[in-house]
Image (cartoon, grey):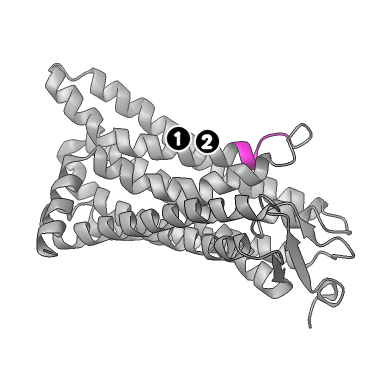
Amino acid sequence: MRPPNQTIVREFVFVGFSRVRGTNLWLFAVVFSMYLITLAGNMLIITAIRIDPRLNTPMYFFLSNLSFLDICYTTSVVPQLLAHFLTSQKTISFDRCMAQLYISLFLGSTEFILLAAMAYDRYVAVCHPLHYKVIMSPRVCTQLAITSWFVGFLNSGVQTVFTLCLHFCSLNIINHFACEVLAVVKLSCSDTFANDLSLMVAGVIVLLIPCILVMLSYVYIISAILRIRSSEGRHRAFSTCTSHLTVVTLCYGTAIVAYLSPKDNTAPNQDKMLAFFYAVVTPMLNPLIYSLRNKDVKGALSKVGKTWK
């Protein structure tokens, strides 16, 4: 049986970023360029990992998962955003809105768990190097990756079901550029206590706990690095973690401000700008961070370039 809210609100209207055509055209050019860089960068990372035997390690297995996830996540949002830059009718049907909400939440939740798995990989590599291959076996890596995707799938399903149970009366204008769960829930004319509670619990399980585990991993990692006597050894050990630590700071920092900070004093457009940074900017920066800070990835990318000549 179809939820009663669909008989009242059949589509949503996005506020977007600007109503000025010239500004929208400029934003289209910028976001389109960023999207192309995101696709090219992440596809190059995946290709390099697949063709270079030196990158057949747990760290790069997780990195290829992250790159694939970033491609999917940004694609769930950016094409629609680009289309809306070129039209004055920034609308989306109720069904498509719920689908976008589900997909983006699924991929975003998966990334938080995957980053925690990558932190565990770095912890084992630095703190237990002699047992690294035994602990981080292909089976364990696959299980960690599957767990990340399953937790994202489960969390997104729960939040989408709770959202579908809401009633949407007359308000259908979303102060956002996509169907983000917090922005959609705000429009409901029914009691959102259950939604707010489920989002808070999900924030703790999917965001806060993985973030704490990542921080604990790096406490042990830094402690182990400081015990290395040679400066060259310390530099080599820390260089394997800096790229991941940078990406973790970008992803968790943005998400914690967006989902776990108090909403009473939040500026009207703050959530929208944070979502843009997380959905558009971060997926573009991730491959750049890993390629610029990692000699193995640089070598593999140069190998990819030679094969395409």
**On residue 249, which mark appears?**
1
Magenta-tinted stretch: 257-262
Q: Position of residue 187 (x, y in %)?
A: 81, 56
165 displayed left or right of 258: right
The question of residue 244 being in magenta is answered with no
In the rendered image, which residue does mark 2 sit on?
253
- The structure residue drawn at horizontal position 53% and vertical position 56%, both measured from the top left corner, is 28
- The structure residue drawn at horizontal position 31% and vertical position 29%, both measured from the top left corner, is 221
192 displayed left or right of 109: right
Residue projecting furthest to the front: 22
- Can residue 61 be seen at all in this image of the molecule? yes
Crowdedness near tag 2: few (<14), some (14–19) or many (≥20) residues, C-alpha within 10 Å = some
- Can residue 144 be seen at all in this image of the molecule? no
The three-letter code of the residue at mark 1 reads Thr
The three-letter code of the residue at mark 2 reads Gly
- Between 23 and 166, the one nearer to me in the picture: 23
Q: Secondary structure at mark 2?
A: helix
308 displayed left or right of 85: left
Q: Position of residue 104 (x, y in %)?
A: 56, 60
Q: Position of residue 158 (x, y in %)?
A: 65, 62
Residue 103 sits above or below residue 208 on the image: below
The answer to which image quadrant residue 191 occupies is bottom right
